[in-house]
């Protein structure tokens, strides 16, 4: 008689506030709800180091790509969806105004990109 395997996943019902938090995180980070849940379960001391300019450019790119979803979440939660466009414009202005950095002489082909992310 073949042994029945136990399923590797299980469906559970989450409270509404947890579902809202997962949807918000998924929309703002341009990821799936499952990935948002995994991220929320990670230890808080894990850090990804980005420079200020890199972080602003990354955030602007993410907001542009998931603009519709973020606006939808804001509408559902009673927020102003125009805030998304304002944030994208503000981040774009910030990145454009940032002074050009001089070449630091780092040879990426010889030394690599640095610490793994």
Image (cartoon, rainbow, N blue to C red):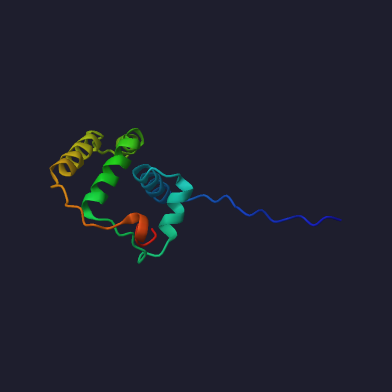
x and y, in percent, of residue 11 in the image = 57, 49
Q: Residue furthest right?
A: 1
Is residue 112 at least partly visible in the picture? no
Which residue does the image show at 14% across and 46% down from the upper left?
Answer: 98
Viewer-side residue, 32 vs 54 = 54
Viewer-side residue, 90 vs 99 = 99
Number of numbered callouts drawn: 0
Side (left or right) of 51 relative to 33 = left
x and y, in percent, of residue 62 in the image = 32, 42
x and y, in percent, of residue 114 in the image = 34, 61
Is residue 109 at least partly visible in the picture? yes
Q: Quadrant of the N terminus?
A: bottom right
Q: Residue furthest bottom?
A: 45
Which residue does the image show at 44% across and 60% down from the upper left?
Answer: 41
Viewer-side residue, 108 vs 1 = 108
Q: Quadrant of the C terminus?
A: bottom left
x and y, in percent, of residue 29 in the image = 36, 46
Which residue does the image show at 27% across and 58% down from the upper left?
Answer: 106
Which residue does the image show at 24% across and 55% down from the upper left?
Answer: 51
Q: Quadrant of residue 89?
A: top left
């Amino acid at each position: 008689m073949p042994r029945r395997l136990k399923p590797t996943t299980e469906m559970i019902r989450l409270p509404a506030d947890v579902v809202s938090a997962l949807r918000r995180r998924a929309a703002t980070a341009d990821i799936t709800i499952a990935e948002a849940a995994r991220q929320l379960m990670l230890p808080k001391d894990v850090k990804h180091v980005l420079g200020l300019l890199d972080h602003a450019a990354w955030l602007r790119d993410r907001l542009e790509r998931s603009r519709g979803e973020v606006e939808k979440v804001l509408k559902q939660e009673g927020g102003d969806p125009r805030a998304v466009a304002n944030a994208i414009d503000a981040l774009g202005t910030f990145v454009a105004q940032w002074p050009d950095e001089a070449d630091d002489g780092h040879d990426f082909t010889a030394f690599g990109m640095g610490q793994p992310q």
